[in-house]
Image (cartoon, grey):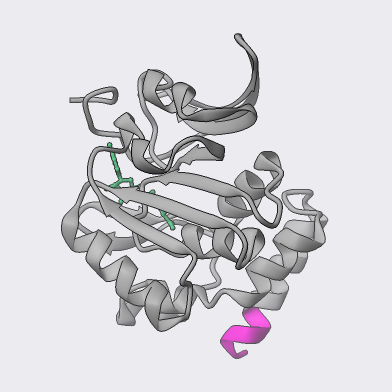
Amino acid sequence: MDLDEEKRRVIEKLIREGYIKSKRVIDALMKVPREEFIPEHLRKYAYVDTPLDIGHGQTISAIHMVGLMSELLDLKPGMKVLEIGTGCGYHAAITAEIVGKDGLVVSIERIPELAEKAEKTLRKLGYDNVIVVVGDGTLGYKPLAPYDRIYVTAAGPKIPKALIEQLKDGGKLLMPVGKYLQKLILVEKRGDELIMKDYGEVAFVPLIGKEGFP
Ligand code: SAM
């Protein structure tokens, strides 16, 4: 079976299992070549729905998690999105597909080597609507704030204050919270009110930074 066929099968499985349902998310998962974001020797596993090692003790997220997070965030064309934890850039590419040419993805990564490699891959694939920034994402990225959506791809002890501040009124933020037991938390900002919803247990690498783990 070739990679395209494996990709089609895994996406059909995620639809059957209820992780993904919207055309926008399905089309993005179909379009982005996950194999381009992982080390050469792991490419044959590109469409196995599991995290894979990308070096520096980090991973590319499982396909169902990228799909589920995209659905929960209700991403739309034209949105400005902040991603914390670029890793290899795969999730940023999926978001970039959904927000399109009129949208923007600002992605922050704390490990410079990963940021550099992710940026190269994103450029090679033509994702000009993604800006990769090296830094501590727990502080957000003020120069381009406020954001329609913010998501974090590493688990922190709490939702960083700066991220709430940099979220637009009516915006949504998605983040795994916890150390050993992590919960995927969706926050909706409505004026001074924060509406939180728990989407269950997840397993992410730690968010390391000023408002994260030491
Ligand atoms: N988004 C990735 C993908 O496309 O599959 C997965 C990212 S990986 C699970 C989490 C990333 O968060 C790692 O690359 C890690 O270095 C990064 N990270 C951890 N703490 C961070 C912080 N404070 N700021 C920015 N990146 C951080």
**Residue 35: horizontal and vertical position, in percent?**
46, 78
**Residue 182: horizontal and vertical position, in percent?**
46, 26
* Front in this rendered view, residue 109 or 8: 109
* Front in this rendered view, residue 209 or 123: 123
For the view shown, which residue lies furthest in the top direction? 192
Q: Quadrant of the C terminus?
A: top left
Verify whether residue 2 appears in magenta.
Answer: yes
Q: Quadrant of residue 8?
A: bottom right
Q: Where 153 falls versus 47 (above or below)?
A: above
Q: Is residue 161 left or right of residue 100?
A: left
Q: Quadrant of residue 41?
A: bottom left
Q: Quadrant of the N terminus?
A: bottom right
Does the image show residue 141?
no
Q: Residue at x 42, y 79 (%)?
A: 36
For the view shown, which residue lies furthest in the bottom direction? 2
Dominant secondary structure, magenta: helix
Q: Where 54 falls versus 34 (above or below)?
A: above
Does the image show residue 33?
yes
Q: Which residues are magenta?
A: 1-6
Q: Residue at x 71, y 67 (%)?
A: 11
Q: Where 80 falls versus 139 (above or below)?
A: below
Q: Where 195 falls versus 110 (above or below)?
A: above
Verify whether residue 179 appears in magenta.
Answer: no
Q: Residue at x 39, y 32 (%)?
A: 155
* Front in this rendered view, residue 124 or 9: 124
Q: Residue at x 41, y 43 (%)?
A: 144
**Residue 55: horizontal and vertical position, in percent?**
23, 61
- Numbered label tally: 0
Q: Quadrant of residue 64?
A: bottom right
Q: Is residue 77 left or right of residue 152?
A: right
**Residue 17: horizontal and vertical position, in percent?**
77, 52
